[in-house]
Image (cartoon, rainbow, N blue to C red):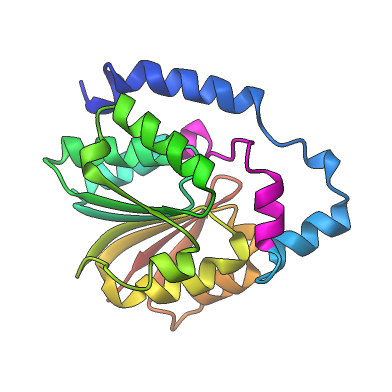
């Protein structure tokens, strides 16, 4: 038994995943060229995400379970998340912290409505005491006040910002720390960074859309 598989969290997650399926983006509404430009832009990404502020953009259930497993198996105590959305991935990682005996999860989101909803879900799941939600642009919210050593990072916000967010966190990553980047194929600059032989990372693609990297030292 674990926090993830028992009440109140397990039934809450079932409900949230069902809501996410009913309110997922219809990517055909976006012209392909426009979507490609916005996903790769470091200056226009807010336009894309503001247009989707009422839509659910969670990791898959399999990726969410992977996050729990990685945090549990490494006995993570400090986690940083870029891109809270409605808090599904946050709930999984906070559950792992609870089952690890406690810890701190810093997550950041620039849409105020999503921050409010995520906070409600974290309260309902009984893990709000483990989570600090920072509202605003991650390039500002993650610039200060970070733990001395970070065990696990999830990158799941604006894809073009992955290299910049990693740069903010990199000096705090402990040797062996894991970085999970969802939809990393939208950030070729990030993939080039973590896959380079002298990057200081060991990095492999996982499933179809996740890059899993380990900090070597």
Rendered residue at 55%/45% (across/down): 207
Left/right placement of residue 193 relative to residue 40 reads: left
Q: Is residue 184 above or below residue 195?
A: above
Q: In the displayed structure, would residue 204 be above or below residue 97?
A: below
Question: Could you tell me residue 169's position as x and y percent?
Answer: 36, 71
Front residue of 167 and 52? 52
Quarter residue 185 falls in: bottom right
Residue 9 placement: quadrant: top left
Provide residue 60's location: percent of width, then percent of height: 53, 36
Q: Is residue 32 left or right of residue 115?
A: right
Name the spot of residue 168 as percent of width and height, x first: 40, 74
Q: Give the residue displayed 44% in from the left and 38% down from the top.
A: 116
Work out whether residue 75 can be spotted: yes
Q: 66 or 137: which is nearer to us?
A: 137
Confirm whether the magenta stretch covers residue 50.
Answer: yes
Q: Which residues are magenta?
A: 45-63
Residue under the point 32% across and 42% down: 93
Residue lying at 58% horizontally and 74% vertically, measured from the top left: 192
């Amino acid at each position: 038994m674990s926090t993830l598989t028992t009440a109140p969290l397990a039934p809450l997650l079932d409900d949230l995943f069902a809501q996410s399926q009913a309110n997922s983006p219809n990517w055909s509404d976006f012209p392909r060229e426009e979507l490609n430009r916005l996903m790769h832009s470091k200056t226009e990404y807010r336009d894309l995400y503001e247009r989707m502020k009422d839509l659910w953009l969670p990791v898959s259930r399999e990726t969410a379970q992977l996050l729990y497993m990685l945090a549990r198996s490494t006995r993570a105590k400090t986690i940083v998340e870029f891109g809270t959305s409605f808090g599904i991935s946050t709930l999984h990682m906070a559950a792992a912290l609870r089952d690890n005996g406690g810890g701190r999860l810093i997550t950041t989101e620039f849409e105020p409505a999503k921050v409010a909803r995520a906070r409600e879900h974290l309260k309902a799941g009984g893990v709000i005491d483990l989570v600090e939600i920072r509202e605003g642009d991650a390039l500002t919210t993650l610039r200060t006040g970070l733990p001395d050593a970070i065990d696990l990072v999830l990158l799941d916000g604006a894809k073009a910002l992955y290299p910049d967010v990693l740069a903010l966190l990199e000096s705090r990553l402990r040797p062996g720390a894991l970085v999970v980047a969802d939809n990393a194929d939208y950030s070729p600059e990030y993939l080039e960074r973590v896959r380079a032989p002298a990057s200081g990372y060991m990095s492999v693609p996982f499933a179809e859309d996740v890059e899993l990297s380990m900090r070597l030292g």
